[in-house]
Amino acid sequence: MSFFFDILQTAYSNAYSSGLKKKYTEPKIYHGGKTFDLSKRWYVYYSFAHPELIGKNGNPVMVRQPPITMSINKNYKTKQERLFHLGIVSEVLLELLKEGCSPYKGEMELNNQSLEYTAIAALDYALDLKNSTLSETSKPDYRSRCNQFKKYLEKKNLADKSILSITREVVNTYLEGIVKASSARNRNNTRIVLSALFGELDDSRIIPRNFIETIKVLDTKSVSHNTYPLEVLEGLFAFMKEKDPLLLLFVQFVSYNFLRPIEVCRLRLKDIILSQKLLTVRTKNKKKGSKTKIIPNIVIDEIKDFDFSTQQNFLFTPDGIGKEWEVKETSRRDYFTTRFRKLKSKYNKHLITQGKKLQLGREYTVYSFRHTFITMLFRKLREDFTYTETCDKLMLITGHSTLKALKEYLKDIDAELPEDYSGLLVL
């Protein structure tokens, strides 16, 4: 036991001598003396260890820092008001000092302007910055989630306090309320938005760090997009060809080009380069710019005779190829998703008339075609190549940004299954 405490004492001594000595005095309020004289200037004061001055005892010299008033003397005229607001400044300043902030340049500097930003003003500022990098589909979501958080702060009387008073505990409590009221997925999505906004404030030096990054992501049940049984595909495609050829072509772009439904909805005629058999699309993993993919001949044969003269029009619209259709991309995606769901319902009825018991439930979606054909391609390549070689070849086709992302995707859709292991179970 003594050996353990020897180690503990040594570790503590080393850590203490390496910089755990307190570099500051806790902020205090000067309130005009014993009589709380309102005619005097009230302020918050503290001292901080100078990074270059060393005292006789070998320790840094503690230097009194400029007083912080935050215009409180001008704005508040009663004892209670001044004590309340200077108390907030004192608490926030202490948190900054605990985070390692310093009033000296070359270190994690204190930004006195940060104390002047109210929570609402800071969030509006961050949202305005973030909007410049968001897609049109993301802007409404960010605005909505930001506004909901601001309403929460108003209810908690935190809206007009410094942004630095919005702590990890405040945000975590808010997120816990979302879980109870809706779902873990909604909570995680809100966390993403708030973390992005606080990241902008971190970059602008308005807050010392984006603490929301340290709040964990909760496990959620993914939306189910089951892989289609191979025996179903031929009949389903034949049914779509007869009942809705436009929808079939939409599905073929998902199936053969391995695009997400919303990516297909983004395609304009100008994005298709027939002469080179290429298409350009803004993908999930591209915040700026686009991804170029080849168009396989199986798709080229279907579109080579289309009229591509109206270059700005979308490839897929309710009225056909290349027509005018100015609605939000989420609405375009929802339109084709609904169109497929209605066709699937008709197909299920058709299967019943054919005496087949198989029914395609809600877990079979347009997105499911992408899973299905990536699985088919993966298993076909695995007949001739190792797992690593197959992933390398497949990554060029699917458009995944990293090999790790592709492998996670293949794992999620159960693309690779083991060989029969019956022999290993023989007693």
Image (tube, helix red, strand yellow):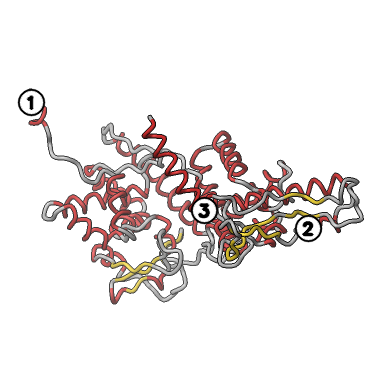
Q: Residue at x 31, y 57 (%)?
A: 258
Residue 19 marker: 3
Circle 3: residue type: Gly
Q: Is residue 114 left or right of residue 368?
A: right
In the picture, residue 23 is in which quadrant?
Answer: bottom right
Rendered position, 209 above or below 360: below
Rendered position, 327 above or below 159: below
Nearer the camera: disc 3 or disc 2: 3
10 Å crowding of disc 2: few (<14), some (14-19), many (20+): some
Circle 2: residue type: Thr
Residue tagged by mark 2?
Answer: 69
Residue 334 marker: none
Sequence-earlier tag: 2 or 1: 2
Sequence-earlier tag: 3 or 2: 3
In the picture, residue 177 is in which quadrant?
Answer: top right
Q: Position of residue 173 (x, y in %)?
A: 60, 39
Circle 1: residue type: Val
**Is residue 401 at least partly visible in the picture?**
yes
10 Å crowding of disc 1: few (<14), some (14-19), many (20+): few
| Residue extending farthest front | 56
Q: CA distance from mark 1 to mark 3?
A: 63 Å
Q: Position of residue 243 (x, y in %)?
A: 35, 50
Rendered position, 205 above or below 174: below
Sequence-earlier tag: 1 or 3: 3
Residue tagged by mark 1?
Answer: 426
Q: CA distance from mark 3 to mark 2?
A: 30 Å
Q: Dot 1: what SS?
A: loop
Q: Is residue 64 left or right of residue 391?
A: right
Nearer the camera: disc 2 or disc 1: 2
